[in-house]
Image: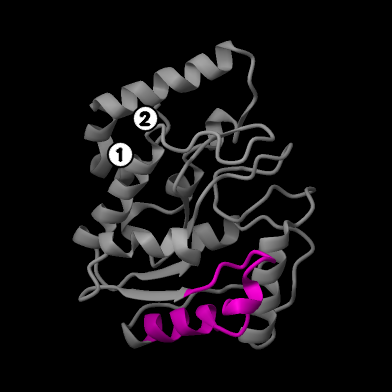
Amino acid sequence: MSAALEESWLKVLHEEFEKPYMKSLKAFLLEEKQKGHIIYPKGADIFNALNHTPFDKVKVVILGQDPYHGTGQAHGLSFSVQKGVAVPPSLKNIYKELADDIPGFSIPSHGNLTQWADEGVLLLNATLTVKAHEAGSHQGKGWETFTDKIITELSEKRNGLIFLLWGRYAQNKASLIDKTKHTIIASAHPSPFSAYNGFLGSKPFSRANAKLIELGKEPINWQIT
């Protein structure tokens, strides 16, 4: 399961793939496939977040919970969907906030956020797989241990990262982050159920860029084309 992982991440995470929890997770995924269950995203996309944003290139981390479970949506980046798929409600609210927050931002016609990942935005879900049409179906199987390790390694070995923590689930990960070295920008989740309770108007994107500039780093170009 580690073979396709980007080199810098493999250096940081290689020991995880030999641990019992990861072997158990791999066995679970194989069993799901043998039962004929469809799993999203497809195998080659599971580690897309890491493969598009190498360890030493991460500037901003956006934490999600689960991959999308609808047909053709998930491709390994939190909040992102493949081109040709309808933009999900949470991402619509993210775009709405961007249009309000970033001067000149034009809402794109699709929901593929790969450009952000290539800019240094780690789009990390806590759980990296899901059974088709069953939200949360792969929670508690080991992925959270793996992704918590990712957050911990970034916190310990990098400096000056910006963590955008939207909603209670993401905010619970704050305990893994060294706040003396990194910046946390927290708000409500962009879901339609909570966006109006503190996500819309929170200006996370301009705040993240202002901090990056303050740290002498290149800001993120949030415009998706």
User: How many numbered callouts?
Assistant: 2
| Image side of residue 60 versus residue 100, left or right | left
Q: Does 119 sit above or below residue 3?
A: below
> Disc 1 marks which amino acid?
Leu
Query: Is 205 part of what is drawn in magenta?
Result: yes
Range shown magenta = 187-213
> Disc 2 marks which amino acid?
Ser
Q: 162 or 50: nearer the eye?
A: 162
Query: Is 37 part of what is drawn in magenta?
Result: no
Q: How many angstroms separate mark 1 from mark 2 (CA)?
A: 7 Å
Residue 32: x and y, percent? 54, 19
Residue placed at 70% from the left, 47% from the top?
A: 82
**Mark 1 or 2, nearer chain start:** 2
- Residue 2 marker: 2
Farthest-out residue, top: 34
Q: 1 or 197: nearer the eye?
A: 197
User: Where on the picture, by quarter, is residue 211?
Assistant: bottom left
Quadrant for the C terminus in the image:
bottom right
| Image side of residue 20 versus residue 98, left or right | left
Q: Does 110 sit above or below residue 164?
A: above
